[in-house]
Amino acid sequence: MSMKLCFTVTLLLICSFSYYMNTMDVNGNQKEYPERDRSALEANNHNSLNLLTHPENHTNSGSCQKQKLEHGTWLYPQEFNMALNKTLLKDLVIRKISVIYFSIGDATNLSAQTLHRYRMFIELAKKTGINAYAVVLEDPSFVNASSSDLRERFGNIIKLTKNMFNVFIVDVEPQVVHGSNPENYLHKYVTMSSVLRKVADKHHVKYYDTVPDWYQTKMKNIGIVDGLNSLSSSGIYLLDYSSNVTQIITRLDAIKSDVNKCIVLNFKISPSGNEPYLNSLQIPSIISYLKARESGFGIFKAIDLVGLPQNLFS
């Protein structure tokens, strides 16, 4: 009996050591498999997705807690003309929106009257229970701006609107320029991010980046080995404009397991533009998956959201 027990224990030790060597690197960290590209990740079907647990979250749970609960929408005030009022806010509240990403572009170009109107709306939103973050620098050309220009432009925007916002979402998106080369602009984006973070810290505000999901893999492929972790922002507003819920969630799981920043997933329900989007019947499904993962989300965009039945968002 003692010989059999000894053999069994030895066999278990060998199997455990073999598993460890195959799954851990020399530093004791879980091995990564970069060859599992986006197309492979998308191979999971709807049924297998139901069995997935949300990936390990490397972020500090305290600092990311608010974003985990965030249900946001992208609001472009010019699309609502003069209808920035209680009725709009009520429409957002009954659709469970807790944050609006309020586009102000380069606020230094706005008239005093427009800024006052925005300020009144933001104050009313906060009284209603909806927070507001500023969406700024909405121009791909900022990725090529000098450090001094970035410091001046971003600093002036913050000073002008700090009484309205303490969170600023930078929406430069250099990838939207036709023919632009990621090998060129992604390195510049990392540099830009560093400059913007220093400006944000100087003014005691939070700054977040807006990037598409494929930046993570592309950055690593061109030598930015830490991917989205290379960015200096406090977190990432991840854009994944797709018509397939399963693919969106699969990509999010993969990125969250590899990025140690707060991530808010943003999906598109607007038919405008050339990007694919989710139809109204897919909205409950993706919200359910995101809530199960304790993942905050943003919906592009508010003008389309308020026209949909409120039960889709409950």
Image (cartoon, grey):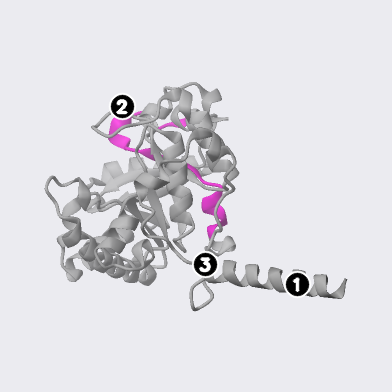
Please tell me which residue lies in front, 201 or 177: 177
Q: Residue furthest right?
A: 1
Residue 271: mark: 2
- The residue type indicated by label 3 comes to Asn
- The residue type indicated by label 2 comes to Pro
Instruction: Name the front one of labels 3 and 1.
Output: 1
Residue interval drawn in magenta: 64-86
Q: Indicate left or right for 149 with 218 as reference.
A: left
Could you tell which of marks 3 and 1 lies nearer the N-terminus? 1
Q: Secondary structure at mark 2?
A: loop
Please tell me which residue lies in front, 272 or 161: 272
Quarter holding the N terminus is bottom right
- The residue type indicated by label 1 comes to Phe
Residue 194 against residue 170 in the figure, above or below: below
Tell me where residue 120 appears, x and y as whole percent. Answer: 41, 42
Q: What is the crowding at mark 3: few (fewer than 14 residues within 10 Å), some, or many (at least 20)?
A: few
Tell me where residue 117 appears, x and y as whole percent. Answer: 34, 40
Q: Secondary structure at mark 1?
A: helix
Mark pair 3, 2: CA separation: 46 Å
Q: Which residue is mark 1?
A: 7
User: Is 75 inside the magenta-drawn segment?
Assistant: yes
Mark pair 2, 1: CA separation: 65 Å
Mark pair 3, 1: CA separation: 23 Å
Q: Residue furthest bottom?
A: 27
Circles 2 and 1: CB atoms closer than 8 Å:
no
Tell me where residue 188 appears, x and y as whole percent. Answer: 21, 65
Residue 22: mark: 3
